[in-house]
Amino acid sequence: MTTLIELIPVLLNKTADRKIPWEDGGDRSFIAVFGDNIVKIKYDHQSQSVDYRLSLLNSEGSILESYAPDRQTDESETLEELWDAARRRAFLVDDRLDTLKKMLNDL
């Protein structure tokens, strides 16, 4: 039986390979749709803590599984890396930076 935790490195690698089409999910979250499944990575900053949560939802938006590691752990850092990679992909940050660099070089 596969767990959500096992999918984290796969999601991170596939995101790095630009194979996952992340979208802005609003409220500091990003989503990727896989058929009837939705993967959601959320960032929550409260006072002095930062929390990341990875969830699997069905097509109606019900949470099927959710994982939030303890703060300041390797797992938390990995989810932070996934959240940042999903953000960069959803907002096309790398493409925009490449375009900006080309425009500046053409000046």
Image (cartoon, rainbow, N blue to C red):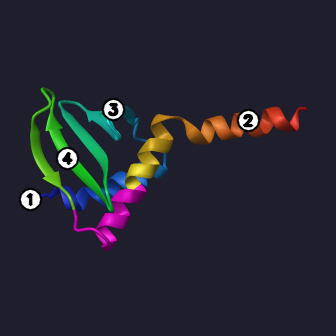
Which residue matches tag 2? 100
Residue 96 screen position, x and y as percent: 64, 35
Numbered disc 2: secondary structure: helix
Residue 71 in the magenta stretch? The answer is yes
The quarter of the picture where residue 81 lies is: bottom left
What residue type is disc 4 on?
Ser
Q: Pick the residue in front: 102 or 35.
A: 102
What separation in Å lies between label 3 and label 1 (alpha carbons)? 31 Å
Residue 12 screen position, x and y as percent: 39, 55
What residue type is disc 1 on?
Met
User: Seen in the image, is 55 located left or right of residue 23?
Assistant: left
Main secondary-structure element of the magenta-colored stretch:
helix
Q: Earlier in the sequence, mark 2 or mark 4?
A: 4
What separation in Å lies between label 2 and label 4 (alpha carbons)? 34 Å
Numbered disc 1: secondary structure: loop
What separation in Å lies between label 2 and label 1 (alpha carbons)? 45 Å
Which residue range is magenta in the image? 69-81
Residue 62 in the magenta stretch? The answer is no
Identity of the residue drawn at 36% across and 63% down: 78
Q: Earlier in the sequence, mark 1 or mark 4?
A: 1
Residue extending farthest right: 107
Which residue matches tag 3? 26
Q: Tell me the quarter of the image containing the C terminus.
A: top right
The quarter of the picture where residue 36 lies is: top left
**Of the two numbered discs 1 and 4 in the rendering, the one whose residue sits closer to the viewer:** 4
**Of the two numbered discs 3 and 1 in the rendering, the one whose residue sits closer to the viewer:** 3
Which residue matches tag 1? 1
Numbered disc 3: secondary structure: strand
What separation in Å lies between label 4 and label 3 (alpha carbons)? 15 Å
What residue type is disc 2 on?
Leu
